[in-house]
Image (spheres, rainbow, N blue to C red):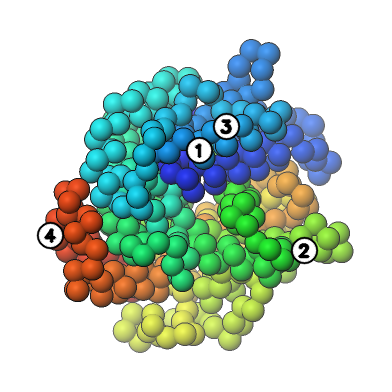
């Protein structure tokens, strides 16, 4: 089944291009770890998911590019075509001459309704190319105006037009130090609205990815493209085909459906985090060897201690003793806090993958008490390695990992709102003070739900 990717705003289009580049690089890489038949099966599944074949031409990404300014879309189309391995359909993009000015309300209330028909027509044409549609992956930022505001409007339009299709929003969380002065307003409005219309929100935090670039990839002068390439690598590690059950004869036929079934068991819990190890520079990789027990032990502790990268993990954090009530568990505001999960998905790729022991992730102490531990963990595997790593493992976690970042955004936005700072910039486009209050209430409920795990 196919996934249609919708790239929204400057950030969404730049990240989206890197995602397709990572997928295509992996698709064409040679792998001696699996059989020729296995490799062919993998390639066929990947192509069906992400690319549409055109006669005598390179495959075209199943994607729609949307931005209110033309510059980034033009650059994105050009870079893709220059790769020689894949391209975008030159008819599947939409841009205008004026952006949203980093204002969520402008994207949501003005550009969204104004351009809904043409954008949804592009979506329909792309959907008609699919023999079987699994759903939609939107790629967007929370900080600006087009990606966040228009992205939210498009998400709601997709839900209305395709109620049976799965909808996964990939959201880039802004730097804590600030990218735009009103980013906390934009983030508040984006998260609260998406929580109502999306099946799940898969979040990448810019600060965490920046640390990966600096500490693991050893990049001296980190660019946005470096950050985007790390995000793309991690997304590719879970989106590429894998067997979703032991002894499966074919790769998963409903990738987004299987993902939702694995990690979103309750509609009140939709926030997903993604970790992938190992990640390192080419130089370091040449001198490194990996074993499944070591990788899985490290990843499990990253989950427990809520560590974003594999360096500097707090190994002192341990699961609570059996029988503790939520009130007896450590407070979410404490620095050393155990990260309770609703559900987890572990994706293993590479050599001797069948020997990997996932027992550590089946520990009931890792999960909330209202789910049986066996039902809270899913494992996907494939003997085909991912890109340059002989062994790699990814974790999609529905857990308390975003409690503090959400709390920070709500707190900062509330301080600004209490003094009515910049509120007039939103009310002039139709977002009233009551709308802000509803969004605060919605996110405070999300925080309360995850805190109670």
SS category of the residue bearing label 2: loop
Q: Nearer the viewer, mark 1 or mark 4?
A: 1
- Please count the marks in the image: 4
Q: Which mark is residue 71?
A: 1
Q: Which mark is residue 171?
A: none
Q: CA distance from mark 3 to mark 2?
A: 40 Å
Q: Name the N-terminal-most of marks 1 and 4.
A: 1
Label 1–label 4 contact, CB within 8 A: no
SS category of the residue bearing label 3: helix
Q: Name the N-terminal-most of marks 2 and 4.
A: 2
Residue at 38%, 83% in the rendered image: 333
Find residue 92 and report its horizontal and vertical position in percent.
47, 26
Q: Nearer the viewer, mark 3 or mark 2?
A: 3
Q: Name the N-terminal-most of marks 2 and 1.
A: 1
Find residue 276 and report its horizontal and vertical position in percent.
62, 59
Q: Nearer the viewer, mark 2 or mark 4?
A: 4
């Amino acid at each position: 089944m196919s996934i249609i990717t919708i790239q929204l705003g400057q950030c969404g289009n730049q990240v989206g291009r890197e995602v397709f580049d990572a997928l295509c690089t992996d698709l064409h890489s040679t792998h001696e770890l699996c059989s020729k038949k296995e490799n062919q099966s993998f390639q066929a599944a990947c192509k069906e998911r992400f690319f549409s074949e055109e006669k005598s031409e390179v495959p075209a990404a199943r994607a729609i590019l949307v931005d209110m300014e033309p510059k980034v879309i033009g650059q994105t189309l050009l870079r893709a075509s220059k790769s020689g391995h894949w391209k975008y359909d030159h008819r599947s993009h939409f841009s205008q001459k004026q952006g949203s000015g980093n204002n969520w309300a402008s994207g949501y209330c003005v550009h969204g309704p104004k351009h809904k028909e043409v954008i949804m027509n592009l979506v329909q044409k792309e959907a008609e190319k699919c023999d079987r549609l699994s759903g939609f992956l939107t790629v967007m930022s929370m900080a600006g105006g087009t990606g966040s505001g228009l992205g939210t409007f498009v998400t709601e339009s997709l839900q209305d037009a395709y109620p049976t299709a799965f909808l996964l929003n990939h959201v880039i969380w802004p730097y804590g130090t600030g990218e735009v002065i009103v980013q906390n307003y934009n983030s508040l409005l984006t998260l609260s609205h998406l929580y109502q219309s999306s099946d799940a929100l898969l979040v990448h935090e810019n600060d965490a990815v920046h640390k990966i670039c600096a500490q693991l990839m050893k990049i001296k002068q980190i660019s946005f493209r470096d950050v985007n390439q790390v995000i793309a690598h991690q997304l590719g590690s879970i989106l590429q085909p894998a067997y979703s059950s032991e002894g499966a004869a074919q790769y998963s036929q409903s990738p987004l459906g299987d993902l939702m079934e694995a990690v979103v068991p309750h509609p009140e819990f939709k926030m997903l985090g993604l970790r992938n190890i190992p990640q390192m520079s080419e130089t370091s990789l040449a001198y490194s060897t990996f074993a499944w027990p070591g990788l899985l032990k490290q990843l499990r502790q990253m989950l427990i201690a809520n560590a974003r990268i594999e360096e500097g993990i707090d190994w002192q954090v341990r699961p609570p003793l059996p029988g503790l009530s939520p009130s007896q568990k450590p407070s979410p505001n404490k620095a050393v806090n155990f990260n309770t999960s609703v559900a987890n998905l572990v994706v293993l790729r590479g050599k001797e993958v069948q020997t990997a022991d996932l027992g550590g992730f089946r520990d009931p102490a890792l999960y909330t008490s209202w789910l049986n531990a066996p039902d809270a963990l899913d494992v996907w595997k494939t003997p085909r390695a991912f890109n340059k790593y002989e062994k790699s493992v990814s974790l999609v976690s529905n857990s308390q990992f975003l409690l503090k970042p959400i709390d920070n955004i709500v707190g900062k936005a509330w301080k600004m709102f209490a003094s009515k700072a910049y509120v007039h910039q939103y009310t002039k486009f139709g977002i009233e003070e009551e709308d802000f209050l509803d969004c605060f209430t919605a996110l405070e409920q999300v925080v309360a739900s995850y805190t109670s795990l």
